[in-house]
Amino acid sequence: MLKENNKGFTLIETVLSILLFSIIAASLFTALNQMVFSFKKQEKMAETQDNMRIVINWVTRDIKAAKEIVTPVGNG
């Protein structure tokens, strides 16, 4: 009688393990990539809002500092 030694993995088990790992890795990469994209978008939006706030403050300060508006009248 032959004694079978079944230590190790079959080719199908190895291929399925690699396939499963690849699917999980691709899903994680996609999720991470989406999070980075979303973070960068939010960062740009916050920077734009800060810049808008600065400009609004400048304009508000200039308007408050104005004493009168002079309209030049042409000779004609």
Image (cartoon, rainbow, N blue to C red):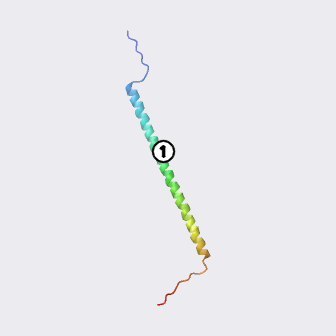
The picture quadrant where one finds residue 47 is: bottom right
Q: Is residue 14 left or right of residue 75?
A: left
Q: Is residue 62 left or right of residue 23?
A: right
The percent coordinates of residue 3 (x first, y second) are 40, 12
Q: Is residue 32 left or right of residue 57?
A: left
The picture quadrant where one finds residue 62 is: bottom right
Kind of residue indicated by mark 1: Leu
Q: Residue at x 44, y 34 (%)?
A: 21
The percent coordinates of residue 71 (x first, y second) are 53, 83
**Number of numbered discs visible in the structure rendering:** 1
> Dot 1: few (<14), some (14–19), or many (≥20) neighbours within 10 Å?
few
The percent coordinates of residue 37 (x first, y second) are 47, 50
Q: In the displayed structure, would residue 66 be above or below residue 56?
A: below
Disc 1 secondary structure class: helix
Q: In the displayed structure, would residue 14 be above or below residue 66?
A: above
From the image, which quarter does the N terminus lie in? top left
Q: In the displayed structure, would residue 58 be above or below residue 37?
A: below
> Which residue sits furthest top?
1
Q: Residue at x 62, y 75 (%)?
A: 65
Q: Residue at x 56, y 83 (%)?
A: 70
The percent coordinates of residue 63 (x first, y second) are 58, 74
Q: Residue at x 39, y 24 (%)?
A: 10
> Which residue sits furthest front?
75
> Which residue sits furthest bottom?
76
Judging depth in this view, the residue of 9 and 51 nearest the camera is 51
Pointer 1 residue: 32
